[in-house]
Amino acid sequence: MALESTGDASDRKNLLLLIQLRWIAAIGQLVTIWFVHVELAIALPLIEMLAVIAFLVGLNLVSLLRYRHRERVTNTELFLELLLDVGALTVQLYLSGGALNPFISLFLLQVILGAILLETWSVWTLVAITSACFIGLTAFHRDLPMPHSHLAGFWNLHVQGMFICFALSACLLVAFITRINANLRRRDARLAELRQQSAEEEHVVRMGLLASGAAHELGTPLSTLSVILNDWEKMPALARNSELAQDMTDMQAQLARCKSIVTGILLSSGEARGEGTIRTGVRAFLDEAVADWRSLRAPVAFDYENAFAPDEPVISDLALRQVIVNVLDNALEASPLWVGLVARRQGDTLCVEVSDRGPGFPPEFAAELGKPYRSTKARAGAGLGLFLVVNVLRRLGGAVEAGRRAEGGACVRLTLPLIGLSGGRP
């Protein structure tokens, strides 16, 4: 669907280019008719020719309404637009000399535009129609008296008309084909970006399936260990040993922590049972995530500022919570002595900045931010944390930026639209 909508956007831009070209054609025809009729004193069927120009103006107004009120533009519609232009040009040529009119080569301009914008069958149909119109104009047309036709060289009116047609066609082709190609390049770049996103999301899905499977498999051994520890705590010989009793208490706490992690994995993948949607506020969500991280990691120095105001109701998203934890973990690993987090509101966006005093990111890292297994850490599997961060934020309509602090260290900035956090469509 995303790839299809990208093609539709490109076709809409091309329709707008055709509309602009038609305005130029209408104005050019008015100027040409005035010059030939007034300056060259060549009699023209003004009523009929002005009626054709009025038709082009009306067609453009209809096309503009179509462009503004509908998102999808098909190949057939572009083909019909060009076909109507060919029809208007044919009528104008019929009224002004037929195939002997030097502007007959404007048919080629329509064919070139069709070759760029249309599908193969449409282009060849357009070639056949313009060829038939050319042949028809050799036999059916109104004669146009040409004064000074006896002059040779460039002073011959027919030669001058051919030159004007050539210069006009060349300028229009360069201007509009350049813009059409720019539209196509933007479309291709967008398609490449969407394919890359699709590949990354597939990678995330595989990782999610592996995590979910591992969580299922870990449930049984964790439960077994919990039962064994409960039995040990009831054994008198072990209960009298204070050191062993304390160790068993610590082991129970760690088992409870492991069960909580497993439950969180299953809940985030939609497999936990009996759990409803948890709604909270942005401030409470951030405070809770930071408090849990601080209690588990116990950083030496941690500056936390929650300046998000006014508060906003959101859904407690475990994936987003893990995003914040991942960024904090990376900062703590790079800078064990100090980590900072500042959260603030900018309009309808939540901005979270995590800073550290570590070595910072190398300049080339910004271009590879969020790519799997791209990391400054020299160990296997490094880089998956930021990869997951980027993909989770992308799903929520947010973005990640990484840079260096002026006073030294790194700064990772997370931006999230509040509509994505509240369960709406970003």
Image (cartoon, grey):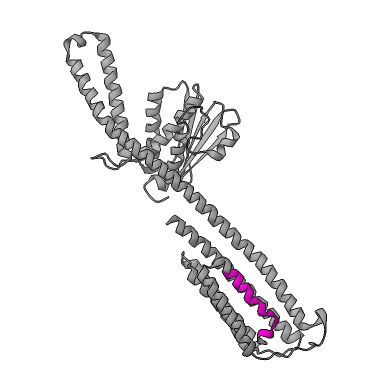
Residue 53 visible? The answer is no
Picture quarter with the N terminus:
bottom left
| Image quadrant where residue 133 sits | bottom right
Q: In this view, does 235 lie above or below 291?
A: above
Residue drawn at the location 53% of the way across and 57% of the way down: 187
Q: In this view, does 189 lie above or below 83?
A: above
| Magenta residues (range) | 99-114
| Camera-nearest residue between 284 and 7 | 7
Q: Is 256 positioned to the left or the right of 51 in the image?
A: left
Q: Is 329 positioned to the left or the right of 141 in the image?
A: left
Residue 235 visible? The answer is yes
Is residue 309 found inside the magenta-colored segment of the image?
Answer: no
| Camera-nearest residue between 151 and 365 | 151
| Dominant SS type (magenta) | helix
Residue drawn at the location 48% of the way across and 67% of the way down: 73
| Image quadrant where residue 60 sits | bottom right
Residue 389 % position (x, y): 44, 38
| Camera-nearest residue between 130 and 356 | 130
Residue 328 % position (x, y): 45, 30
Is residue 102 found inside the magenta-colored segment of the image?
Answer: yes
Residue drawn at the location 31% of the way across and 26% of the way down: 257
Q: In this view, does 321 lie above or below 151?
A: above
Residue 401 % position (x, y): 53, 39
Count of labels shown? 0
Residue 158 % position (x, y): 75, 82
